[in-house]
Image: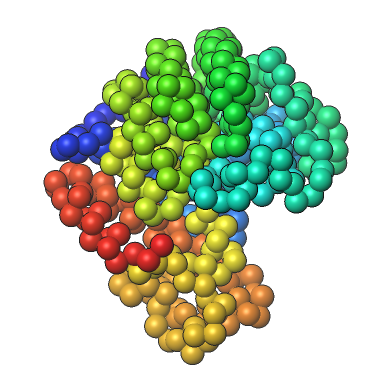
Amino acid sequence: MSIRFTIEKKLDGALGRAGTLETPHGTILTPSFVVVGTKASVKALTPEQVHEAGTQVVLANTYHLYLQPGDEIIRDAGGLGDFMKWSGPTMTDSGGFQVFSLGAAYGKDISKVVSITDPNFLIPERSSSGEDPLAKIGNDGVSFKSHLDGSLHYITPEKSIEIQHNLGADIIFAFDECTSPQEDDRYQREALDRTHAWAKRSLEHHQKLKADNQKQIALFGIVQGGRSEELRTKSAEVIGAMDFDGFGIGGSFAKEDMSTAVKWVNEVLPEEKPRHLLGIGEPEDLFMGVENGVDLFDCVGPTRIARNGTLFTKKGKINLLNAQFVTDFSPVDEGCECYSCVNYTKAYLSHLFRAKEMEAGTLATIHNIYFINKLVSDMRASILDGTFFEFKNKFLSGYNK
């Protein structure tokens, strides 16, 4: 078996659970946050720093690694973990999100999670650049131009699986189409049928490669369906019936109904297999996901905002470029035991950001990763000791979004 998932304790009155996910490169205690190392690197940190910040598992981006340095180079280096010198579990996405970011979202101010009151949600054709999309979707696959050099590429489900097998992560994902939250019902249905067909092809090719190469790689299928309960439920039924090792919950969400959509899906998916919520990393959303049965999360958010000077605290986010922190000699978050908080002050980190020192991004990223890892670890502990809802209410009551 490629992975083994065991549920240790279920959350009373909800879908949440604490468990263990055994992989060829170590056991993940769930729920767990998956730190994103897009190009086989967590920006600004060494693998040792990533580990010391409490990280259990790292996810890399299939699309980016395919283009640079190339999946065959990583294969020849011994696989993703050996290439980046990360000894723990690894994951790769399918490249499906780039179908969205280089297609429907290209040149437009659209994100994966958007409020229904956001003007960009209400104006489908709004574009800030007027540029043509770099990705074009057909029933067989996706053609796209490289954002690096403009070269033309074509990715099918089979090609995505081959690339991911070369990358050699412990857990990989089926190729899917992530749709824009603005797409109408007709297109959402068309895209869902395509995602289900691609899932079947991904699984068949994965099983063939696995038999040929004897690699212990697990494949997760991805549930789509947008904001529609009918489509989300249908997708969970179709993908859940396939012989995947676990499941990803993908697509775009409206902020107001994301928890409902996650609950629809997890009420249908097989309980005994792990579930991964793709691209979600805000503290309040992590609580929502855990309560509704999510075991794994990944998101570039915590590391991306860190490099821009925004850090998590128990009272909410702060931006160290604000004038009030220039002479603030307290740690970023009182009581935090990360390397940055134990050794440095807000004033010092504020200075580093203002001086544009590289160390600023390093110390800020260490803190944000530690903060999110610790938060999800505490959620796990609270499930095990029966205090999840008390912990959730206490944290969110003091957290200013």
Tell which of 219 and 119 is nearer to you. 119
Of all residues shown, which one is farthest toward the bottom?
327
Q: Is residue 399 above or below residue 98?
A: below
Count the marks: how many? 0
In depth, the one of 200 and 103 nearer the eye is 103
**Which percent across, then down, holds residue 252?**
53, 37
Q: Is residue 120 above or below residue 249?
A: below
Q: Is residue 26 above or below residue 317?
A: above
How far across and how far down the image is residue 90, in percent?
49, 37
**Residue at image coords 41%, 40%:** 257
* Residue 304 as seen in the image, left or right of residue 148: left
In which quadrant will I find the C terminus? bottom left
Regarding residue 90, the answer to whether it shows in the image is no
> Residue 98 falls in which quadrant of the image?
top right
User: Image point 61% across, 32% down: which residue?
Assistant: 183
Q: Going by the image, does 330 lie left or right of 101? A: left
29 vs 240, nearest the viewer: 240
**In the picture, residue 28 is in which quadrant?**
top left
| 282, above or below 28, in the image | below
Q: In this rendering, does residue 386 appear at all? A: yes
As drawn, is 36 to the left or to the right of 62?
left
Image coords of residue 74 (percent x, y):
66, 35
Query: Quarter of the image containing the N terminus?
Result: top left
Report the residue at 25% width, 34% height from top. 15
Q: Residue at x 30, y 51 (%)?
A: 377
Q: Position of residue 110 (x, y in %)?
A: 63, 46
Colouring chosen for the image of the structure: rainbow
